[in-house]
Amino acid sequence: MIVLDGISKSYRLKNGPYEAVHSVSLQVFQGEIHGIIGTSGAGKSTLLRMINLLESPSTGHVRVNDLELTQLTTKNLRNARRSIGMVFQAFNLVHNRSVKGNVLIPLELAGFSKQARLERAAECLRIVGLERQAEQYPSSLSGGQKQRVAIARALATNPTVLLCDEPTSSLDPQTTEEILKVLKEINRNFGVTIVIVTHEMDVIKSICNKVSIMEAGEIIETISFEPKGFAALKNDYQSLRRQLLSEVDGDV
Amino acid sequence: MFDHIMQYQSEIWQAIGETFLMVGISISAAVLVGLPLGTLLFLCRRDQLLENRIVFSILNVFVNVVRSFPFLLLVVFLIPLTRFIVGTAIGTLAASVPLAIMAVAYYSRLVEQSLLEVPRGIIEAGTAMGASTLEIIYKFLYVDARSGLLLGLTTSTISFISYSTVVGIVGGGGIGDFAIRYGYQRFEIDLMVFTIIIMLIFVQTIQFVGSTTARLIDKR
Ligand SMILES: Nc1ncnc2c1ncn2[C@@H]1O[C@H](COP(=O)(O)OP(=O)(O)OP(=O)(O)O)[C@@H](O)[C@H]1O
Ligand SMILES: [Mg+2]
């Protein structure tokens, strides 16, 4: 479970402080897929990056699995990060390591034995359907395959939470669908909580249980699609869509 | 003509040995000190992991000052330090001191530039995985920058050879000094041409090996 309690983030710019995220509180329960949608510059990435303290909040608390991350020592924070995977829009793979090599990195960092590392890497590549590409280098893969490697890498150390920052934004619609399917399977089979930042309505529609709409550094509304998922909202769909449309760029 | 050159065989071999010693020491200094220093230079930059304006400025000024010194003046300027380290300011080992310091400054700048080419997101991915700064350096930065680091070392080595030719003034010897003393100053043109060809072969070989290896290890 993720609990954000009144977190803000301000940056010091030339013309004074700028608050990218303003006093956001949010709870994401174990096993949920929680979307964050909003216009460019709304603070979505900043908010997401505070969940694993890639950005440290200026004020407020971040609790993941009952661990208060803002209070941890550097070493304990590094340990805590092993149970929070992260996937990026730009994939961020190590280009000079093979597909398998990339999935091995977090396992090496976590000090797994060689045997355990190889087994776990193979297992993660199987989950994302890339066992046959294990020895290839990222440069020879398609965008969708690269993102699968990134997902396998993020899963390696058995995280309870997976943070995704626009994981499908540089992919075509069909590849997007495939990646979302992988994410959904991971959520269903392993109970991994997923927080996904996006500006695409379709992403929210196809996998999220809840969505938070962000604007100017604040969450202005959180909508739950439970218990029957997004489809159950059919009657309210028009109003929901209008609402999202009014908050989000025209590309929705 | 060939006979004439062969007369100087032992001197030429000695000169080659001296060049190898000086360049070898320079490369070692570049790798052992320049690489960590260049890495620190990179990490202390704005918005990097160890952002530190003071450390960055000190390193930056050191690199700029050493690199902007005309090398011959650096050799003279460093004589007291050389005497302190080696015990004498004359000879091949003594000449290696200014060469090594130049090597450190030269290569650390190239290291910094190579590391700047690693996409920022890769460092972030490392941080998100729970990697320490040291782990980010050798599991992410050095891995993805490795061909740039090697090409930089290749360029540096060739510059070290070139710098090593002027240390004759402190009795450093070496193949360049041999060309100047025997070929240029005594008008033995054949000796001069021969030694220049030797240097050309060295430089070509180093560049070829460096470029080829860099290409082979680059999977980007
Ligand atoms: N390191 C930083 N320094 C200064 N300002 C920043 C920094 N990071 C983000 N910002 C600012 O904070 C605001 C929110 O940025 P953020 O990246 O969180 O937006 P976003 O909602 O993810 O937008 P996008 O959809 O374009 O990715 C932006 O105005 C951005 O310019
Ligand atoms: Mg963003």
Image (cartoon, coloured by chain):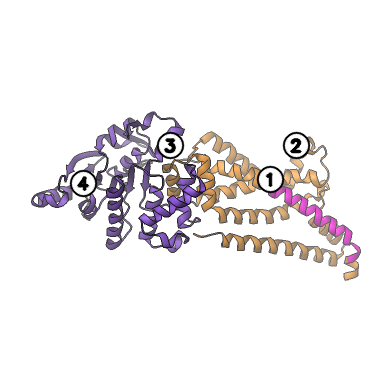
Residue of label 1 = B29
Tell me which chain the residue with mark 4 is part of. Answer: A
Classify mark 2: helix, strand or loop.
helix
> Which mark, residue A209?
4
> Which mark, residue B62?
none
Classify mark 3: helix, strand or loop.
helix
Residue of label 3 = A79
> What is the quadrant of the N terminus of chain B in the image?
bottom right
Give the residue drawn at x 43%, y 54%: A122
The Cα–Cα distance between marks 1 and 3, rounded to whole angstroms, is 36 Å
Q: Quadrant of ligand 1?
A: top left
- Classify residue A148 as left or right of residue A203: right
- Chain A representation colour: purple
Please tell me which residue lies in front, B80 or A214. Answer: A214
Give the residue drawn at x 39%, y 52%: A152
- Classify residue B56 as left or right of residue A128: right
Residues tagged by mark 2 and mark 3 found on one chain of the structure: no
Q: Main secondary structure of the magenta part?
A: helix
Residue of label 2 = B81
**Where residue B12 sits: x, y (%)?**
85, 59
